[in-house]
Each structure stands twice: as structure tokens, then as C-alpha cells.
Image (cartoon, rainbow, N blue to C red):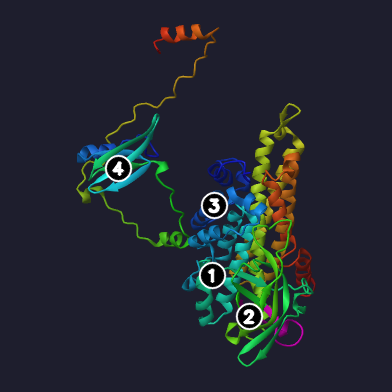
Amino acid sequence: AMAWRVAPRAAARLLLGRRGIASCIDPSTGLTEDQKEFQKVALDFAAKEMAPYMAEWDEKEIFPVETMRKAAQLGFGGIYVKPDVGGSGLSRLDTSIIFEALSTGCTSTTAYMSIHNMCVWMIDTFGNEEQRCRFCPSLCSMEKFASYCLTEPGSGSDAASLLTSAQRKGDTYVLNGSKAFISGGGDTDVYVVMCRTGGPGPKGISCLVLEKGMPGLSFGKKEKKVGWNSQPTRAVIFEDCVVPVGNRLGAEGQGFNIAMQGLNGGRINIASCSLGAAHASVLLAQEHLTVRKQFGEPLANNQYLQFRLAEMATRLVAARLMVRNAARALQDGREDAAVLCSMAKLFATDECFGICNQALQMHGGYGYLKDYAVQQFVRDIRVHQILEGTNEVMRMIVARNLLQG
Amino acid sequence: QAIDDDCNQTGQLLAAMLDWPQGTFASRVELEDGAVRVQREVDGGLETLRLRLPAVLTADLRLNEPRYATLPNIMKAKKKPLEVIPAADLGVSGGSPRLKVLQVQEPPPRAGGEKVENVEALVEKLRQSGRI
């Protein structure tokens, strides 16, 4: 069954908005001409190349490699990576706008693309020239795909307590341990792995880049998930896995810092994916309310539903502003950027889940059927409140800023 | 069809001025040696013409899928030079339009229809009004 009940071109019109209709949630307001162009390409791509397939990718658990490579040809493989290694060199705000738009087509796939982008940026930013040239070009084109490996079975929120060890032996590191819940794990080619080269705590952690095929690198079973089914999730296992020292990003002990800096952008990106899903859901709800009749009139005549829709729209715009504000802070290198990214991630992922969930409720029984897209948006963004730092950890970060400075 | 006046005449006018053959609303184009095979959709099906080159073609939506603009190209577009050339420099005289809009009006509102009792009455009505 088609995920979107409307054909792709109509979906694009729905997403881009008919003039005047739903102009209060128009995501192009306040953007520069260039940004509107980026957004238009991304919305077009989402409507034509992703939306018609999102249900199938979810149901059959297909990792849409060819579609993502098409997206990479347009520059979506390394959006905020420097152009000299194949990136598009755009800002964090441009990136947020793009992921928000792509997410309207398939949130799960867009979220994976954002993780991939985060990894390429980490290599671009913290790698030396040789590493940048070795890894970035093929990642930007998505000839190869990347995964971010921080979480372990024993360390999620307490990320700095990770145990995967990397023992120095001559000009190699030997890794032992495992990572859990790795997006793309097993299907991707490049793994950015945070591991312990020194003592306990964050300062003993380094960042190594591993490649599929390295002896001692293996994967667990593919996890069965509630959503994010267009990307495989597996454990990544290291058993005396030998990695050249030349694969270390930055200095020994810099790994945790690299991981956290990656996550600042990652949080904006995940929040942006939530925004796209929520926007799509509001439009789906609006359409349903106009079409569905009960008690002799369209649901849209019902003041309760009008008010609920208005609340959903208001929260969506509030969340969008939080995310875009954080993106600006990050690209401007402001001191408060990290905490703003945490606030934005917390607020947007929570609010947008509420919006999608409300949209499902407004669909009544139909909302529960997989023939209708709204349930997939709900399932796909549920995990955004958990990964890249749980929303509880986001509160910790904000509280620390308020109370400890 | 131009997006302003919807006249659907530029390609046709050009062909007439050049005295070249024209293939309009092309939904499929195949180059041959010194000629081009142009197909367009008509009410009854597909019409194919073989035109000797040079020829003027106009394209229909069905001809192809436009490419997406890439992010780098969107950024480069800003920096491309925009050269303004006065018509006189190209030896084109008379810059003012030769078409004058006399009137724009809505079509007359639809008149009500008529129900008939049976097929014979329908056929009779159609004959009377000259439709068949």
C-alpha cells in the first residue's frame, strides 16, 4: 500500500503548501533565497523519491542504498563537510532545513543520513589531511556508508564509562569489546568508534575509524525495532581487532570530546527529522479533518479538533524556532551552543512526538492502520526522544548550565 | 505554452519565420541521420512525425524528468554572471509588444442541463441541436 494516500506530485504540493493554506506552519518563512532553494530540492526529492516508498522500506526493512546515493549526488551525503573533500560546505542551519524537508518523505532514512553526515563531519574536522582524503570523498558520495559507535551494552547515558579497550601494540591498536544499537551496523563500511586507550573516564577515550572487513570486526543479529526499520541496527563486536594507529582521529584522550562535538550537530539533525515528521503529520491531520465527516459535518467544523490542530501547529513552530536558533548558535561558534542544542533536541523531539501522536488520534481507527502514513511517523520519531542522548540527559545538561554555570 | 499568456505560439512562430518543420508537444524524440522522429500524445493515441533537420521542437511534460538541482549548483548559481543585453545590440528593432490585450472575460456560466426519458429522446435531442 502507498504510504502517502496522495500521488507524489500532489504530496509535494501538500508539503510545499497551497498558497495561503497552512501558511502559519510554512517552513520556508524567514529563510534566505538560497535556503528556500535547498529546501525545495529536498522537499521535491522527499516527495518523489522517498514518500512513495517509506511504507515498503519500513515493512520489508529495506536499507535504501540506491535512493540515498541519489540523494548524495545532490550533495546530501556530506552537507556540512568541507568541499575540498567532496562535501557541500553548508551551514548547520542549511543542514537542519534540509533534513527537516527530507524527513517528510521518510523519517527513518533521513535520520540514518544525518548519522552518516555526522560521522563524515567528525573525520573531516578532526582527521588529518591523509585521513580526510582517504575517507571523506567516498563517504560524501555515499559510495560508502558510515556508523557512529559510542553506546555499549553497559554504557548508554553514562557514555564516558565505556569499556571497549584499545591496547597500543607497536603501530596498531588492538580492540576488544562491543557496541550496542549501532545504526547501519553490519551494512555500513566505515565505523567511527570511541574506545578506551587510557585510564577511566572521558579523558581516557580515543576515536578510531574502522572499516568493515578488518579481522576481528563482526556484528550481532539485526535488531527488530518498533520503527527506524529502513536502517539496520546491530551490535558491533571487536575481538582482538587490529587497527592501524593511522586510523586514530585526533590525539589519544580526545575521543570523548570528538564524540560530544559530533553529537551537538547530531542533536540538531535528529530534532530536525522530528520537525519534518510533525509537519507532515499536521498536514495529514488537516486533510483528514476536512475530508472525514461525522454527525453530518466535516470533522474540521468541530471546535475541539480545531483547537487541537491549532495547538499542534503552534508547538511545531515553537519547536522549529528552537532548533533553528540552536543551529545558528552552533554555526556561529557561540559558547551556549551545546546547551542550546540539548534544549532544542529535548523540546523538539518531545513536542513533535506529541504532534504526530495527536495527528494519529485525529485519524481515528484509520490512524492505527499501516495503510496510513501517520502511524509510521509516530513510530519512527519515538526513538528520537531516546538516542543521541536521552531527553533525560538533555535535562541534565541544561540543569548543569543553570546551576553550575 | 508560456506561463504568462498561455498562447502556445512561440515555437510555431519561430518555425514559420525560419521556414523549418515543427514538432510540438514532443513526448518522445529520436534522432536519426539528418532527421528527427517526434512523437506527441493526441486524443486518439500517439502521433509520430519524421522531420528533416533542422527543425523546431517544443517539449511536453511527458518528454522527460527534469534533474534535481544539486546543492553545489544552487550555490554556484548565485555567482554566475547575469549579462543584460539591450535588444538593439542584437539588431532587434521595435522593443514594444505587437500583441495588445483587448479584453479578458470569464466564459459564460454553465447553463442547466436537461433530463430525457429514454435513449430515443436523447438521440432526437442530439439530432435537433445539430450534434449528430
Tell me whether the residue at label 2 lies in contact with that at label 3, contact meaning CB atoms closer than 8 angstroms.
no
Crowd around label 2: few <14 · some 14–19 · many ≥20 (10 Å): few
Q: Mark 2: which secondary structure?
A: loop
Amino acid marked by disc 1: Leu
Q: Are marks 3 and 1 on the same chain?
A: yes
Q: Quadrant of residue B1?
A: top left
Crowd around label 3: few <14 · some 14–19 · many ≥20 (10 Å): some
| Nearer to me, B36 or A122 | B36
Crowd around label 1: few <14 · some 14–19 · many ≥20 (10 Å): many
Q: Mark 3: which secondary structure?
A: helix
Give residue A215's mark.
2
Q: Mark 4: which secondary structure?
A: strand
- Residue to which mark 3 is pinned: A49
Q: Nearer the viewer, mark 2 or mark 4?
A: 2
Q: Nearer the N terminus, badge 3 or badge 1?
A: 3
Give residue A139's mark.
1
- Residue range of the region highlighted in magenta in the rendering: A194-210
